[in-house]
Image (cartoon, rainbow, N blue to C red):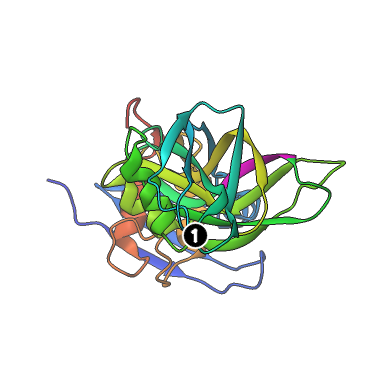
Amino acid sequence: MLKRSYTSINVSVDGCNPEVSSRARFAGARVMLPVTLLCFMGCLVTSAPAEELVISNTRVATAGMSGGFQCANGPSIYYNPQIIQAASCSLNTLTYTYGGRRVGMFDFDLSGVPEDADIEGAFVRLQGVCCYGQTEWFELSMMPGIGTFNVSVANQVYDTEGEIVPHPPTIPDPGPGDYPVDLELLESIRSGSNWLLIGIDRSGTFTNLASAATLHVSYSTGPPCDGDLNDDDVVDGGDLSLVLGYWGTGNPTFDLDGSGLIDGADLAIVLGEWGDCPEGE
């Protein structure tokens, strides 16, 4: 018969020089831990860095309104343009508007982000090709998209109040501009359409951008097995030192059983999974 597990831990922490005696009995086996060594190992342990997924835009298009009072004509869609132009109606004579209004559109498929991933950050990178010798700015809209661009999508960009942002690149050194993406928006998209739509509108003269963009998503996933806290595919002293180092706290990263407290139950999980993590977990 297996005996009930128990722990006896005394902790006095001073930076990385704690005086800790630790004894754990699990499934009838007694494990004595050289805690000084464990503390040293814990000081060397760092969390695994987040992974970055770079997603190229799946589709690109522009939509243009022209003619009539206040560019009243509905938009026409132009697919795979050489450059993205965003512009507003100009030279309004009260009876006719010369020029036209254009918006640019990119969409990104988020299905490559693992379902169990926690998204930690995201930005869209737009490339500049020409800025007419001055610092450009435009209205940038980010919203759930769909798999096909059409007039309804173009109207969605026209009708949405985006964020007015400067586009950093200027002649003679055009380059990338990085714009943060709201993480709550990304999470809602992942549970819905799985497409992020980037719309670019402009009030004033032209803003020209390259017809390719990238979405950069940083994310982390859970460890391959519950006791592997430092994500090195093995449960060993490094993981044990993390549990001991955060003993009695509510740090959610190391609270393996989700009880709100790092205690003997979490220690038992680490000891119970000691060794290499099984493949596929």
Q: Which residues are magenta?
A: 124-129
**Residue 174 higher or lower than 123, as above or below:** above
- Measured as percent of width and height from the top left, residue 182 is found at 47, 58
Does the image show residue 228?
no
Q: Is 218 in front, or is 159?
A: 159
Amino acid type indicated by mark 1: Thr
174 relative to 80 in the view: left or right:
right
Q: Is 124 in front, or is 187?
A: 124
Q: Main secondary structure of the magenta part?
A: strand
Residue highlighted by disc 1: 95
Using a 10 Å C-alpha cutoff, classify the residue at mark 1 as few (fewer than 14 neighbours), some (14 to 19) or many (20 or more): few
Farthest-out residue, front: 95
- Measured as percent of width and height from the top left, residue 144 is found at 35, 49
- Measured as percent of width and height from the top left, residue 191 is found at 27, 47
**Residue 73 higher or lower than 164, as above or below:** above
Task: Judge whether residue 27 is colored magenta.
Answer: no
Farthest-out residue, left: 1
Q: Secondary structure at mark 1?
A: loop
Name the residue rendered at 39%, 45% in the picture. 154
Name the residue rendered at 41%, 43% in the picture. 75
30 relative to 38 in the view: left or right:
left
Name the residue rendered at 54%, 44% in the picture. 50
For the C terminus, the image quarter is top left
Q: Is 34 in front, or is 182?
A: 182
For the N terminus, the image quarter is top left
